[in-house]
């Protein structure tokens, strides 16, 4: 699944408008719409945007980062516990910060 489709599905499950989610996440409606439609695939959302969208929609920022391609598939383990995922993600962020 792509990040855009996942965001759209979650937003619709919560019966929220593009405007509501975008406003709460501090991004433009156009940017969120483009993300949902897959038009921003070449420009991966920043970690800050991922965190804000995740907080707004009450979903895992780690999973959004995986869908956005920020966390490589060989690090992501969908059956892992929340602690394992968090630890793997923290290791990955340390690696990225050291680049």
Image (tube, rainbow, N blue to C red):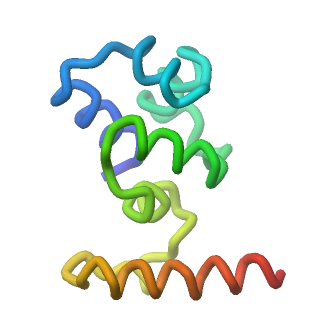
Residue 5 position in % (x across, y down): 32, 38
Q: Quadrant of residue 64?
A: bottom left
Residue depicted at x 59% and y 82%: 92
Observer-nearest of 5 and 97: 97
Q: Is residue 32 left or right of residue 5?
A: right
Observer-nearest of 57 and 1: 57
Q: In this view, does 15 lie to the left or right of 71?
A: left
Instruction: Please determine whether, in this image, residue 86 is positioned above or below residue 56.
Output: below
Observer-nearest of 5 and 65: 65
Instruction: Please determine whether, in this image, residue 12 is positioned above or below residue 17.
Output: below
Residue depicted at x 25% and y 84%: 80
Q: Quick one: quadrant of the C terminus? A: bottom right
Residue depicted at x 57% and y 65%: 70
Residue 75 position in % (x across, y down): 44, 84
Residue 13 position in % (x across, y down): 16, 30
Residue 38 position in % (x across, y down): 47, 35
Instruction: Please determine whether, in this image, residue 63 is positioned above or below residue 29.
Output: below
Q: In this view, does 35 lie to the left or right of 4?
A: right
The extreme right residue here reads 99
Residue depicted at x 19% and y 81%: 79
Question: Exactly how many numbered labels are in the figure?
Answer: 0
């Amino acid at each position: 699944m792509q990040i855009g489709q996942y965001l759209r599905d979650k937003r619709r499950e919560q019966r929220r408008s593009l405007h509501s989610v975008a406003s709460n996440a501090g991004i433009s409606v156009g940017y969120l719409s483009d993300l949902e439609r897959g038009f921003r695939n070449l420009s991966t959302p920043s970690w800050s945007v991922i965190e804000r969208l995740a907080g707004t929609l009450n979903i895992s920022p780690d999973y959004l980062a995986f869908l956005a391609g920020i966390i490589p598939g060989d690090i992501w383990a969908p059956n892992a516990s929340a602690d394992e995922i968090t630890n793997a993600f923290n290791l990955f962020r340390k690696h990225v910060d050291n680049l």
